[in-house]
Amino acid sequence: MTSADLSRAQWKKSTRSSGNGQCVEVADLADAVALRDSKDPTGPALLFRREGWTSFLTSAKQGQFTHR
């Protein structure tokens, strides 16, 4: 995936974030989803195609990534 202009991205943290600085933030873009470390807002961001992000969320909700 190519780089994206993140200057106008509206970053969101999970409502379940504990506020201890160990969070990620997500931004919906026109054709992708961006993910960044909340401790480093000017640092790099990961970009995902919307289909890949949706698949990841579905799998997580189904418990496929549960730590055992």
Image (spheres, rainbow, N blue to C red):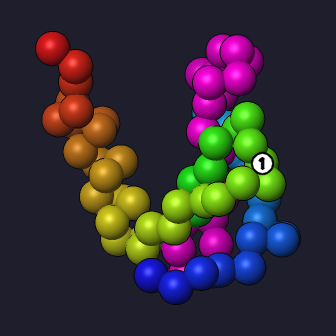
Q: Is residue 2 above or below residue 27?
A: below
Residue plotted at (42% across, 74% down): 49
6 sits to left or right of 44: right
Q: Is residue 27 above or below residue 40?
A: below
Q: Is residue 20 above or below residue 53?
A: above
Residue 58 placement (x, y as % from top left)? 29, 48
Residue plotted at (73% across, 35% down): 39
Find residue 61 and report its image quarter: top left
Three-letter code, disc 1: Pro
Residue found at the far bottom of this picture:
2
Instruction: Say which of 23 and 13 sits in front.
Output: 23
Find residue 42 and report its image quarter: bottom right
Residue 38 placement (x, y as % from top left)? 71, 38
Quick one: SS at disc 1? loop
Q: Is residue 16 magenta?
A: yes
State the predominant SS element of the stretch in magenta. loop
- According to the image, label 1 marks what residue? 41
**Image quadrant occupied by the N terminus:** bottom left
Residue 32 placement (x, y as % from top left)? 53, 74
**Image quadrant occupied by the C terminus:** top left
Q: How many marks?
A: 1
Find residue 63 and report its image quarter: top left
Q: Is residue 11 magenta?
A: no
Q: Which segment is the magenta one? A: 15-33
Q: Is residue 64 above or below residue 56?
A: above
Residue found at the far right of this picture:
8
Residue 30 placement (x, y as % from top left)? 63, 80
